[in-house]
């Protein structure tokens, strides 16, 4: 059993658990009802106006079908709106509402602050190196993902 404690998959899963726990606790303490995926979606929508759901899914490396439920919940909370795309009548563009803009502005500093808590076992120098290696590893394995990251300029 102890061999799993040295396996990348196990350690990455544990760090993800820690990350979600820290994020959830910090948002709840600040009085915000927001998940990490919802935050990622709101951030991507803010940075990419008139975004359709498929493009959004690629930008945050999330399954488009599963993301539909995330967007439904954000819409029910009044944080985003959906409208028919002027370029493709079959697609819906997603935009932040004023309430969504306000919540995102309130949460962004909190999310930056909690990053240190997620990697609290590392020095500042180690965090930089770890993040660089993590980015390299995820970029190198991106094509193996069921929901690969697809930057907008990649088409």
Image (cartoon, helix red, strand yellow):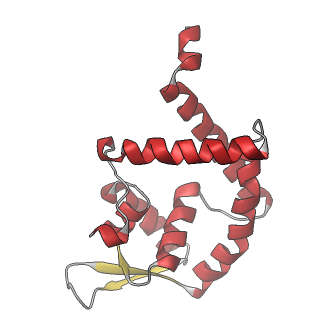
Which quarter of the rendering shows the N terminus?
Answer: top right
Q: Identify which residue, 88 or 126, lies in the foreground.
A: 126
Q: Give left or right: position of 42 versus 91.
A: right
Residue 67 vertical position relative to residue 55 in the rendered view, above or below:
above
**Quadrant location of the C terminus?**
bottom left
In the rendered image, the residue lying farthest to the bottom is 86
Q: Position of residue 116 (x, y in %)?
A: 75, 50
Q: Is residue 66 left or right of residue 89?
A: right
Q: Nearer the viewer, residue 88 or 71?
A: 88
Where does residue 25 sit, x and y in percent of width and height?
74, 50
Residue plotted at (77% across, 35% down): 121
Camera sees residue 75: yes
**Residue drawn 67% across the image and 48% down it:** 128
Q: Quadrant of residue 149?
A: bottom left
Judging depth in this view, the residue of 73 and 146 nearest the camera is 146
Q: Is residue 39 above or below residue 133?
A: below
Residue 68 shows in this picture: no
């Amino acid at each position: 059993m102890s061999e799993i404690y040295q396996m990348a998959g196990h350690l990455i899963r544990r760090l993800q658990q820690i990350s979600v726990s820290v994020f959830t606790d910090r948002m709840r303490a600040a009085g915000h009802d927001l998940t990490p995926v919802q935050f990622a979606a709101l951030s991507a929508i803010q940075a990419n106006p008139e975004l359709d759901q498929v493009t959004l899914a690629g930008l945050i490396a999330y399954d488009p079908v599963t993301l539909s439920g995330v967007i439904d919940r954000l819409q029910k909370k009044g944080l985003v709106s959906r409208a028919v795309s002027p370029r493709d009548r079959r697609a819906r563009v997603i935009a932040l509402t004023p309430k969504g803009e306000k919540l995102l502005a309130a949460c962004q500093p909190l999310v930056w602050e909690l990053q240190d808590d997620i990697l609290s076992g590392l020095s500042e120098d180690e965090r930089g190196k770890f993040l660089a290696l993590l980015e390299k590893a995820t970029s190198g394995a991106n094509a193996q993902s069921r929901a690969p990251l697809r930057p907008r300029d990649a088409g």
